[in-house]
Amino acid sequence: MQQQNNPIGNGSFRNGPVHGQAQEGIARDAMGTNGDQYFSATFNAMGIQDFPPFRGGPPRPRSSMGAPHPMAGKQYSSTSAMDQMPDDFAALNLAVGPLHNKGAVNDFEPKSPGLPHSSSTSSFASYASMFGQNPSAPAWPFVPSSVAPSAHSPGSHNPAVFNAGVQNGPTTPKTSSIVPAFGPSQQNPVSTPSNATLGPPLFGSSSQIPVATSTNPVSTNGLVYTSAISPIHSPGISPASSPLTTRRMQSPVTHSLRQTTIPQKSASSSLVQESVGGTTYFYHPDDFKPQIEGPQLTLPSFCAYPGMPSHIVHLKMKTNVPQYFAPDELKMDILNRHVLTMMQVEPTSPNAVELPTEVDKYHNLCPLERTGAPKPSLGNLPSTTYKAVCTKDGLYYCLRRIHGFRLASTKVNSIMESWKKLYHPNVVSLKEVFTTKNFNDNSIVFVYDYHPGAETLMSQHFSSHPHINGFNHHHHHHHHFSRDHGKNSSNARNMNNNLLPESLIWTYIVQLSSALRAIHAANLAARSLDPSRIIVSGKARIRINCIGILDIITPEGSTPPNINAYKQDDMTAMGKIILALACNNIMCVQRDNIQSAIDVVQRNYSPDLKNLICYLLQNTNRVRSVNDVMPMIGARFFTQLDTATLRSDVLDYELAKEIENGRLFRILIKLGSINERPEYTTEPSWAETGDRFMLKLYRDYLFHQVDEAGLPWIDMAHVIQSLNKFDAGIPERVLLVSRDENSMLVVSYSELKRCFQSCFQELVAQHNQGTTSFS
Ligand SMILES: Nc1ncnc2c1ncn2[C@@H]1O[C@H](COP(=O)(O)OP(=O)(O)OP(=O)(O)O)[C@@H](O)[C@H]1O
């Protein structure tokens, strides 16, 4: 049996002392600080036994654990019944809101360098190195790595801690007097529960094996109570035997899966009949055939986190391009967005007093920009941007209010409808437009999607140095770049240094041209395109903002808007944005500076970039089109696609971890609902009796063990590994000891799981009864 092969591993898991086998790694890993925990925390190969095979394959010699587990054979399809357990436990069914944030698509660079047009010639750093010395363990699966404990329990250094004096440990109310009866009495004392000599089946009706202890065992109802101190002082797992140490030694499945019976053809029918754990399965021989002919394969009957996929570990990221998110950054970014979304105006502040409590169907208005007199903005009208919650759907939106505007005509309706229908990942969607007097004036409000944490391209790239109004000489509005303008900063500044990486500029080009392509195809024009009308979220995800405003506030009177001319303006505006980005200077787009700015591009970037800018800024009467930009982007489209795909791989991996975390979290919620429940159907001792008592001891086994000095033994790998076994309901047994050590019981995870499910279902059923009788 596996445990016997590795005394550090599971052999000591249930049985206590393992002397003199300390491994340096145990102590170091015990708290999960080096990340190795990450894997073993969610699964340790050593403890899993007796899994049913996934059809086919010859029976292997039985392990000493005895008969097949009653759940065996049911688990071909259902791996984690607890998690799938239907429950209308309200807290478990959290509604998932719409996903606002698609994230930046350019966080990762493809590994292969030097492709034509990719300009990826810079140095690469291993993605894995982001996580320190252990590439396979970027974070702790259960808690953010930032809060994972950084010190470990003193006891975990000690290989022989299992003989801890529990006398010093936590003392709890005596519970032995209410030890329940589990199953039929079956006296089968064993001294070492995990020992291979364990004998009779431990499942079904006889899953509790009394444990002989050093002093006068007294048996009642199949349990053995001792009055003296047990030699096994800590329930079950030894603090010296963190699951960490063994996780890489053994596949979780290979040696532990075996078939319980040989499938046989039934004499009476063409169906194949197979008996697994007392349940007979019938299936058509054809179903079975490929299994015979093919390689023998097995599936585990449990869910577990298998670790980081190799294509993620070995993913290389560009370090000189500020586009990637390390996973920790990703988490911070998400948390940051959540916080910003929840941000509110201090209710007692003067700002709050000024703000209307409700505008149309929006409330909780919170300004997104610095307060003060609004500056003239689009159409030379002052505007203010707010975040607000819609009372209809409870979602957050971005409200852009144009002050002092009276809507004269309703002719713009059709163009607004077109804007509302436009969905593009690089355009901030317009939701609705309404006029209001709630601000004590005539205001028109444009409602857009809210992208928390978004910054304008202007503030992202051009805010550090002064800029002047060079863009908008033929726009209706005059103050696009007005915040800092008027200072004659030198053109030469930043011309030859601090330039943006070309790949970042192309990233923007691809996104901008993609957005314009969609807008123009809808027979619309962005019109207000400039760096303060583009928002950046994440590292390099851009969206065109403020769409549709100019179409309303500068109606063309009776003449239809000249969309084609506006489209040409868009092309020019895009050329200027690219030029400004390439020079890293907003001033270069002034008419007098353009030629020298293009020289800068020529000196520092590829000819393609210069050609693209020249195409967009040309003064000829030739009609320019986004479709002409596409071939100029050329193979860079592939780079863009590759990065986006790689990023989605990384996010996929992050999600994979969270799925496993969520599964364990739901188990803990359910366990918490059962444990220590003070009263249940007027029975104060509900949580202390019957199946619940076992679950209480299991809770102690999970969380409340102490080391030999009586100090808390904290090993998250143990908790997570054990929870996974619990969720899988495997036949492996654990030794549970009451706090007063007067009762011990050996119980299989499968039995624990059965108790757990029935207890929780009982609670849910009662809950439902209550809600229906009250309603
Ligand atoms: N849809 C949106 N979602 C989230 N944040 C946004 C959105 N639109 C704008 N913002 C943010 O709100 C703030 C104010 O936006 P705004 O466009 O008014 O910028 P501004 O620089 O103040 O421009 P202006 O000079 O026209 O007022 C900026 O930080 C911007 O990033």
Image (cartoon, grey):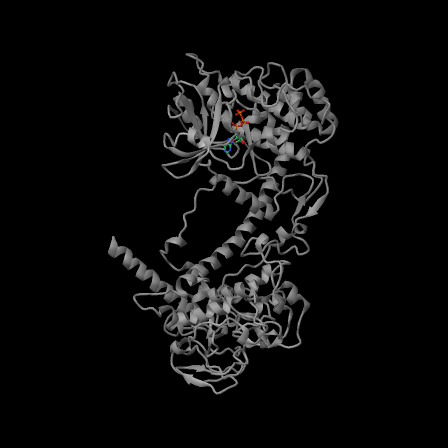
The quadrant of the picture occupied by the N terminus is: bottom right
Please tell me which residue lies in front, 372 or 672.
372
One can see residue 663 in this view: yes
Residue 378 image position (x, y, % from top left): 50, 21
Name of the residue lying farthest toward the top: 558
Measured along the vertical axis of the image, is residue 71 above or below residue 136? Answer: below
The total number of labels drawn is: 0
Measured along the vertical axis of the image, is residue 372 above or below residue 696? Answer: above
Measured along the vertical axis of the image, is residue 747 above or below residue 338? Answer: below
Measured along the vertical axis of the image, is residue 112 above or below residue 303? Answer: above
Please tell me which residue lies in front, 372 or 216.
372
Residue 503 image position (x, y, % from top left): 66, 35
One can see residue 52 in this view: no
- Residue appearing at x 59%, y 20% in the figure: 572
Residue 733 image position (x, y, % from top left): 49, 74
- Residue appearing at x 65%, y 16% in the figure: 591
Residue 347 image position (x, y, % from top left): 43, 36
Left or right? Give the position of 64 relative to 596: left
Q: In the picture, residue 464 is in which quadrant?
A: top right
